[in-house]
């Protein structure tokens, strides 16, 4: 793949993986991206997962066409991007490794060497001259690891963005829903906790007129796609509401709480709610549910009372939200309890310490099965959510 006359793609697709980082379902695989930047000197940007080292080096050597690499830019030390650094240095022993100070500390831990004789330590604003092309480095700590740097070819408006702007799915997968769907699940699953850090980086790169984004996972974004990705990252990282709608997330043991959630969704739709995302927390992908909770401004949590508290899957879900800084949202509750409903009290208490969470005045409570009054409670809750 040719990104431009001077930038070539040398990454790989992983179609064997089932869980990314041991937890994110990736039925369409994942791409490990790497790039070669040509000037009078040549820089390779990041490597790939350990299992694809030979394929990656073959891609690199094919693009080099007999030339030698002068630099290996290490933007991110997570193992799916750094595992082949030593193998690269065996092939190109005279190359310099360009990375942050902390990245070299991590290399020492990973490889038993920090490649002292080959180091170029870069901090925020540093540059390297390739001869006819300058690469500028942007410190991006905690997006989403502390050692991260990003790289800008500012003459051409190209941002090499490390793990930011990534997306699940191999590059040979065509996603009919476009970039945002799996990029959103990726962002809130992996980067979501670090919104303030993402905001800091967005401010740093704002003056560079970015036209192309080259992430370490997912497709290269150009033109309007790049502009839209920057817009969405600003929304996501500032915890703003992206879309008008309500996410309804439920747990149910014998089906009664499920019926309550489904009935509320039906009422909301009948009253003109533009989008209702209904999620069974026990059966659907956890991070799809997390994605919906952050996408919409209103969240309804419907849970069975369990062991005098809340159902385990609901407890885990709320923990995921809090861990990622869930804020600026309205949360409503539906509880079910065979003899002593207690789920609402427990769920509400779990949000203690969260920023800018408003609780709906209306809550719905049933004992086992809905009663004649339940419909009225659900109608009232729907009206409050749609104000």
Image (tube, rainbow, N blue to C red):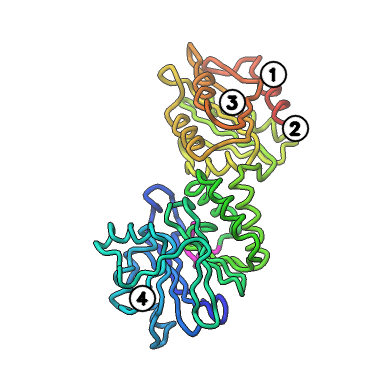
Locate residue 342, reporting x and y percent: 50, 16
Q: Residue 76, image x and y in percent?
A: 42, 60
Circle 2 residue: 271
Spatial CA span between label 2 and label 3: 17 Å
Residue at 40% from the left image edge and 86% from the top image edge? 67
Numbered badge on residue 376: 1
> Could you say whether the residue bearing mark 1 is in a helix, strand or loop?
helix
Q: Are marks 2 and 3 in contact (CB under 8 Å)?
A: no
Q: Earlier in the sequence, mark 1 or mark 4?
A: 4
**Relative vertical location of residue 387 with respect to residue 365 in this rendering, above or below:** below
- Image position of 312 (left or right of 297): left
Distance in Å between CA atoms under marks 4 and 3? 55 Å
- Tag nearer the camera, 1 or 4: 4
**Residue at the spot x=58%, y=17% of the render?**
365
Residue found at the very far top of the displayed protein: 339
Residue at horizontal 43%, vertical 69%? Answer: 73
Q: Which residues are magenta?
A: 167-174
Tag nearer the camera, 2 or 4: 4
Indicate left or right for 56 with 371 as reference: left
Residue in front for this viewpoint, 310 or 200: 200
Residue ID for mark 3:
260
């Amino acid at each position: 793949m040719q990104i431009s006359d001077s930038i070539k793609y040398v990454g790989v697709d992983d179609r064997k993986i089932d869980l990314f980082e041991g937890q994110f379902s990736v039925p369409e695989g994942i791409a490990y991206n790497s790039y070669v930047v040509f000037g009078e000197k040549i820089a390779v940007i990041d490597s790939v997962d350990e299992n694809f080292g030979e394929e990656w080096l073959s891609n690199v050597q094919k693009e080099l066409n007999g030339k030698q690499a002068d630099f290996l830019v290490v933007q991110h030390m997570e193992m799916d991007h750094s595992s082949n650094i030593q193998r690269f240095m065996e092939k190109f022993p005279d190359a310099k490794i360009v990375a942050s100070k902390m990245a070299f500390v991590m290399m020492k831990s990973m490889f038993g060497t920090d490649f002292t004789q080959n180091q170029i330590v870069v901090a925020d604003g540093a540059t390297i001259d390739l001869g006819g092309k300058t690469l500028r480095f942007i410190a991006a700590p905690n997006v989403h690891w502390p050692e991260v740097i990003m790289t800008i070819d500012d003459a051409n408006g190209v941002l090499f963005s490390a793990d930011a702007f990534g997306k699940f799915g191999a590059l040979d997968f065509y996603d009919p829903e476009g970039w945002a769907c799996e990029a959103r699940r990726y962002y809130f699953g992996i980067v979501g906790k670090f919104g303030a850090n993402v905001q800091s980086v967005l401010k740093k790169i704002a003056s560079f007129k970015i036209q192309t984004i080259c992430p370490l996972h997912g497709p290269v974004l150009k033109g309007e796609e790049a502009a839209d990705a920057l817009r969405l990252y600003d929304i996501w990282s500032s915890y703003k509401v992206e879309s008008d709608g309500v996410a309804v997330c439920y747990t149910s043991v014998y089906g009664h709480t499920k019926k309550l959630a489904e009935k509320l969704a039906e009422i909301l739709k009948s009253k003109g709610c533009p989008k209702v995302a209904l999620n069974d927390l026990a059966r659907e992908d956890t991070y799809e549910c997390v994605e919906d909770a952050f996408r919409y401004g209103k969240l309804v949590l419907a849970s069975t009372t369990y062991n005098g508290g809340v159902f385990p899957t609901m407890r885990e879900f709320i923990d995921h939200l809090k861990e990622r800084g869930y804020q600026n949202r309205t949360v409503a509750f539906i509880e079910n309890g065979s003899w002593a409903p207690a789920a609402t009290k427990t769920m509400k208490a779990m949000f203690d310490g969260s920023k800018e969470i408003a609780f709906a005045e209306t809550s719905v409570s049933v004992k086992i099965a809905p009663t004649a009054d339940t419909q009225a409670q659900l109608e009232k809750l729907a009206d409050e959510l749609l104000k």
